[in-house]
Image: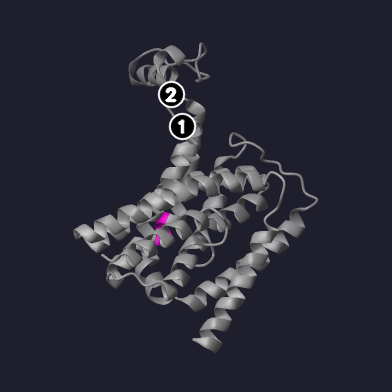
Amino acid sequence: MAFIEWLKVILLGVVEGITEWLPISSTGHLILVNEFVHLEQSDAFMEMFDVVIQLGAILAVVVIFWDKLWPFHTRKNAPKESWFVHEAESGFMKGFQSFCNNYCHMDKIVLWLKIAVACVPAAVFGLALDDWMDEHFYNATVVAIALIVYGVIFIVIENYNENRRPKITSLEALGFKDAILIGLFQVLSLIPGTSRSGSTIIGGILIGASREIAAEFTFFLAIPVMFGASLVKLLKFGLSFTGTELAVLLVGMLVAFAVSIFAIKFLMGYIKKHDFKVFGWYRIALGVLVLLYFFLIR
């Protein structure tokens, strides 16, 4: 494969690594970039590539937040007091409680249960509508409209949120009902251009979560969602890669992983002092430019 083609793969990895975590739509940006940067690969491969490349970005979350996500510990680090209010006296439950007390961070187990609950709505709608969405919504016009609409929503919500004090300031304070509500907002991200992170962050802010907690939960929620979406695309593609296709996919994922490390750290530092309005204005400007290009220039 020509050197210029590898530069295109690297560019796509950079775009994915930046836009997956900033609330500006990674899928939307990849669709737009593909209008101008064409890899010499089949349409079926590129459809799969645009989704599976996100696995590299997801691995960055696992690396950065490992201490918050890994739910197990060694027995020597077990707490002195049981996590369970009522201790079982015998049988399976006693063994289960003993295992949890000796080897599990129960607060992290509960966090993963919240993540699982929040994933259900997107999984149900995503599996049911995947082919239909690919056929009708994966185009530049839909992306541009979604960019503009969600840009306006971000600005309106941040204006509404200016004088409110968040009631959810820790992951422990985020309940299962809150997780389900955020999961319902994630369904909106099935439309390309809306942004999965943008949809869930908006949902988190609206239910009273701080920007930091809304962003963190959004990152964690991406892990099972994107693994699931990638598995679906891989199965549809057939897992029959040529050597070049496999290399393209791996390079794209590696670049997305490296760039995502910086993008996540930037966003977490940025929102400690700023709101999301700048991303709203960016989305509106980009959406307008895309509409102008496709309707007046192309």
Q: What residue appears at the point 61 percent right and 42 percent down from the top-left corner?
A: 213
Q: Which mark is residue 104?
A: 2
Q: Which mark is residue 74?
A: none
Q: Quadrant of residue 47?
A: bottom left
Q: What residue appears at the point 53 percent right and 61 percent down from the top-left corner?
A: 195
- Say if the magenta span includes residue 124: yes
Q: Which residues are magenta?
A: 123-127
**Which residue is at the far bottom?**
296
Q: Is residue 125 left or right of residue 152?
A: left
Q: What residue appears at the point 37 percent right and 52 percent down from the top-left corner?
A: 253
Task: State the image coordinates of residue 182 (x, y, percent, origin top left).
Answer: 56, 51
Task: State the image coordinates of residue 34 (x, y, percent, origin top left).
Answer: 41, 71
Task: State the image coordinates of residue 259 (x, y, percent, origin top left).
Answer: 48, 50
Callouts 2 and 1 close, C-beta under 8 Å: yes
Q: Say how many tags the image has.
A: 2
Q: Is residue 223 left or right of residue 292?
A: left
Which kind of residue does numbered mark 1 sit on? Ile
- Say if the magenta span includes residue 226: no
Which of the two residues, 235 or 123, is positioned nearer the viewer here?
235
Secondary structure of the residue carrying numbered label 2? loop
Residue 265 visible in this rendered orientation of the protein: yes
Task: State the image coordinates of residue 270 (x, y, percent, origin top left).
Answer: 66, 47
Q: Which mark is residue 109?
A: 1
Q: What residue appears at the point 48 percent right and 61 percent down from the top-left corner?
A: 26
Which of the two residues, 145 or 83, is positioned nearer the viewer here?
145
Dot 2: within a 10 Å radius of its alpha carbon, few (fewer than 14), some, or many (20 or more) residues? many
Mark toward the start of the polypeptide (2 vs 1): 2
How far apart are the alpha carbons under marks 2 and 1?
8 Å
Q: Quadrant of residue 5?
A: bottom left
Residue 226 visible in this rendered orientation of the protein: no
